[in-house]
Image (cartoon, rainbow, N blue to C red):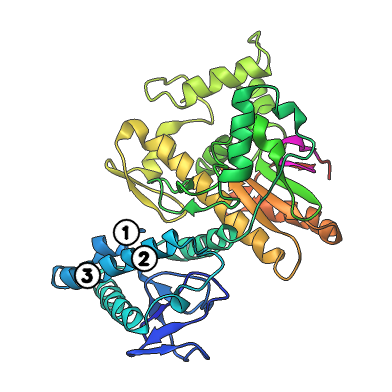
């Protein structure tokens, strides 16, 4: 049964089904809707928005419904503008309490028609389940307020420029992270304009980010993309620092230190015209023969991406690593369900948790789950701190 939710917040429960609005109870048998909102949490529900790769209503709308949708969206934007002018905080209020019932029904009906059109005309993506779980997690993160403050941050106030940046982050920027699941073709997360800029935040300002509980704990893979490549090539994972391992296997007898060897490796690894690694375990042609068909890559995580040969390896590794990390974030979130701790945010291949002291005994289990992803056991780094910028290595 197709339905539409009336707000995107978990506490704002209201649905439109068969021409009626329901607020006091959710009807049974709901199966399909436009997009997950948090107010209806049923794993059996499927989302048209995921079927079409994050396209908006206008892009998904068939021609015969475009006029009806346009009129509904004009009215919707007018209401949103009036609420903004009235300084109504939409994160603290339910949308359906602020607009006329007639409009809600008209808007939901056209959304129902577009939703039906999508399910009738688009195939289910191979990676649908991954997208479903990933979006539910980043939607949850969107409504978690970050603790951003200047405690113990006097060292950030030494220049006028830094003081202005700190003021913007503390007083003006939203204190939450709003990820875009479809911001890149590879699946790497981006953040929306009205989000905390966690993915591009200068490292010196990380001290502003504090836990809402007791500790920030981070997990990231040692040489994430290199380990992804080794797994795709069928090679066992080294149980040591990946760049130390590379020094012994690729550069033995070469007078270079670890940092120099790292630079040499990546300059060759991602250079399409450099064939110097093909005689080693890093045989790019061997991997591309398995995952690239001459016009697109098909990743082990179920993504198909159009790309030319020059960028194929980069897209394959980047996409697979991003999906592995998000998949592990979903797994960690499930472990922390019904606790005070939570997944705070994700930065590329790093997952940062906000841990309450009563859940500290879970950290070894969380590390083990993070390490064991769908491609194997990847060596992981663990850090802990009272702020994002002061995190130090944690030996477990």
- Find out whether the residues at labels 1 and 2 contact each other: C-beta distance under 8 Å: yes
Q: Nearer the viewer, mark 1 or mark 3?
A: 3
Within 10 Å of the Cα at label 3, are there few (<14), some (14-19), or many (20+) other Cα atoms?
few
Task: Name the outermost residue toward the left.
Answer: 64
**In which image quadrant can residue 165 be found?**
top right
Q: Where is residue 364 drawn, in percent x and y?
A: 80, 53
Which residue is denoted by mark 2 in the rendering?
49
Q: Is residue 53 visible?
A: yes
As drawn, the residue found furthest toward the top would be: 255
How packed is label 2: few (under 14 Cα within 10 Å), some, or many (20 or more)?
some
Q: Residue at x 29, y 65 (%)?
A: 57
Locate residue 297, reporting x and y percent: 36, 45
Identify the mark nearer the N-term, 1 or 2. Answer: 2
Q: Is residue 242 left or right of residue 271?
A: right
> Does 62 lie within the magenta span?
no
Q: Are marks 2 and 3 in contact (CB under 8 Å)?
A: no
Quadrant location of the N terminus? Answer: bottom left
In this rendering, would 298 be left or right of 89?
left
Residue designated by label 1 = 55
Instruction: Please give the name of the residue rendered at 32% of the width and 65% of the height, measured from the top-left corner.
Output: 78
- Label located before the other in sequence (1 or 3): 1
The magenta segment: 385-393
389 in the magenta segment? yes
Q: Nearer the viewer, residue 348 or 295?
A: 348
357 relative position to 312: left or right = right
Is residue 73 or residue 128 the one in the foreground?
Answer: 73
The dot on residue 71 is 3
Quarter of the rendering containing residue 79: bottom left
| Residue 164 location, quadrant | top right
In contact (CB < 8 Å): disc 1 and disc 3: no
């Amino acid at each position: 049964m197709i339905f539409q939710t009336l707000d995107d917040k978990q506490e704002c429960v209201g649905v439109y089904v068969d021409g009626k609005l329901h607020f006091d109870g959710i009807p049974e048998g709901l199966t399909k809707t436009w997009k997950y909102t948090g107010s209806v949490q049923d794993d059996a529900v499927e989302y048209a928005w995921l079927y079409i790769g994050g396209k908006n209503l206008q892009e998904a709308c068939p021609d015969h419904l475009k006029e009806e949708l346009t009129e509904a969206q004009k009215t919707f934007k007018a209401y949103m503008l009036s609420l903004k002018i009235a300084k109504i905080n939409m994160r603290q209020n339910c949308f359906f309490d602020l607009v006329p019932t007639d409009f809600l029904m008209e808007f939901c009906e056209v959304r129902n028609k577009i939703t039906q059109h999508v399910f009738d005309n688009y195939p289910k993506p191979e990676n649908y389940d991954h997208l479903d779980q990933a979006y539910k997690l980043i939607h949850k993160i969107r409504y978690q307020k970050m603790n951003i403050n200047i405690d113990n941050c006097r060292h950030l106030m030494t220049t006028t420029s830094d003081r202005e940046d700190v003021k913007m982050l503390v007083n003006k920027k939203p204190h939450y992270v709003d990820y875009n699941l479809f911001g890149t073709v590879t699946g790497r997360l981006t953040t929306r304009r009205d989000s905390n800029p966690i993915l591009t935040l200068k490292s010196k300002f990380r001290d502003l980010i504090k836990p809402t509980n007791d500790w920030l704990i981070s997990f990231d893979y040692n040489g994430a993309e290199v380990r992804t490549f080794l797994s795709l090539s069928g090679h066992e994972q080294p149980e040591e620092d990946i760049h130390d391992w590379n020094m012994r296997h690729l550069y033995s007898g070469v007078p270079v230190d670890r940092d120099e060897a790292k630079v040499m490796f990546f300059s060759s690894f991602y250079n399409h015209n450099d064939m110097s690694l093909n005689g080693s375990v890093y045989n790019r042609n061997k991997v591309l023969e398995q995952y690239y068909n001459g016009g697109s890559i098909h990743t082990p995580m179920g993504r198909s991406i159009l790309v030319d040969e020059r960028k194929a390896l980069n897209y394959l590794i980047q996409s697979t690593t991003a999906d592995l990390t998000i998949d592990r974030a979903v797994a960690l979130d499930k472990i922390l369900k019904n606790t005070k701790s939570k997944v705070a945010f994700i930065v590329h291949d790093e997952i940062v948790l906000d841990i309450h002291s009563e859940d500290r005994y879970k950290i070894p289990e969380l590390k083990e789950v993070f390490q064991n992803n769908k491609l194997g056991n990847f060596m992981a780094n663990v850090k802990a701190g009272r702020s994002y910028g002061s995190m130090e290595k944690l030996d477990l």
